[in-house]
Image: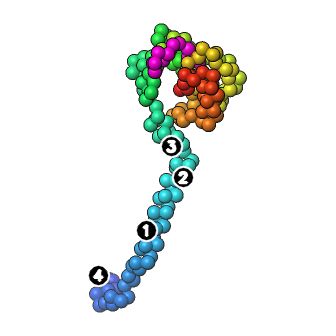
Amino acid sequence: MHPHHKAVLEDLQTLQLDEKEIPQKSPFLTIILTLAAILSILLMVSFIFVTFPIADILLGKAESQSLQGNTLALNQYQIIFENDTLTNLQSFYLQQQKVEWSACLEGTKESNIYHITHTYQPSMHQQSFNHVSFASCSSDTLIFVHTHPYKRCQASQTDRDTLQNIQQEHPDTLML
């Protein structure tokens, strides 16, 4: 062993640290660091919810219903798609996935059951990813369909106002 190494080892063995010389963690510092970590996590989570439309997606999922065959069962209503009406709606969707669009569904209503026998799209004045402007549906329309961007199924205030205006003359009209 090199003489210099031997001297270093001897010095290390004789070194006695006083317990008072070892720095102790301050309880105040621990509390401050814990609060800073919690605040950082809350800021990151809030950034995610504000920046990304996670809340809209979750609300849309909660309010959405899936078709069972050709029937859509909602809380107060049942919608039955007859003839090729469901295929027509699916075709509208597949052809216009990149923009919002609207459709008018006609048929009959018996109690709370809507039988859809005809679908058509009104003339679209303007379409974009998050907006559509279109001609009015006919007075025979039972259900007004209006799409939104992918996974954002919440109706806007404009949508609700439009439905309310339509329902003043046609109270049985629904909006999907």
Disc 3 crowd rating (10 Å Cα; few below 14, some 14-19, many 20+) is some
Circle 4 or circle 2, nearest the eye? 2
Q: Which residue is drawn at 48% across and 39% down?
A: 59
Dot 2 amino acid type = Phe
Pick the front one: 79 or 139: 139
Real-space Cα distance between discs 1 and 4?
A: 48 Å
Looking at this rendering, what residue extends furthest in the top direction? 83
Disc 2 crowd rating (10 Å Cα; few below 14, some 14-19, many 20+) is few
Disc 1 crowd rating (10 Å Cα; few below 14, some 14-19, many 20+) is few
Compared to residue 32, the image places residue 47 above or below, namely: above
Q: Name the residue that disc number 2 marks.
A: 47
Let me know if residue 86 appears in the view: no
Whichever of labels 1 and 2 marks the residue nearer the N terminus, that label is 1
Q: Name the residue that disc number 4 marks.
A: 1
Real-space Cα distance between discs 1 and 3?
A: 27 Å
Residue 168 percent coordinates (x, y) = 62, 26
Q: Name the residue that disc number 1 marks.
A: 34
Dot 4 amino acid type = Met
Indicate the secondary structure of the residue bearing disc 2. Answer: helix
Circle 1 or circle 3, nearest the eye? 3
Q: Give the residues drawn in magenta, as a range.
A: 104-114
Question: Based on the displayed image, in which of its 4 quarters is residue 52 positioned?
Answer: top right
Q: Name the residue that disc number 3 marks.
A: 54
Whichever of labels 2 and 3 marks the residue nearer the N terminus, that label is 2
Real-space Cα distance between discs 4 and 2?
A: 60 Å
Q: Locate residue 6 relative to residue 80 in the image: left or right.
A: left
Quadrant (top left, top right, bottom left, bottom right) of the N terminus:
bottom left
Q: Is the Cβ of the residue at disc 1 closer than 8 Å to that at disc 2?
A: no
Compared to residue 166, the image places residue 152 above or below, namely: below
Whichever of labels 1 and 3 marks the residue nearer the N terminus, that label is 1
Q: Locate residue 51 relative to residue 72 in the image: left or right.
A: right
Residue 116 percent coordinates (x, y) = 50, 14
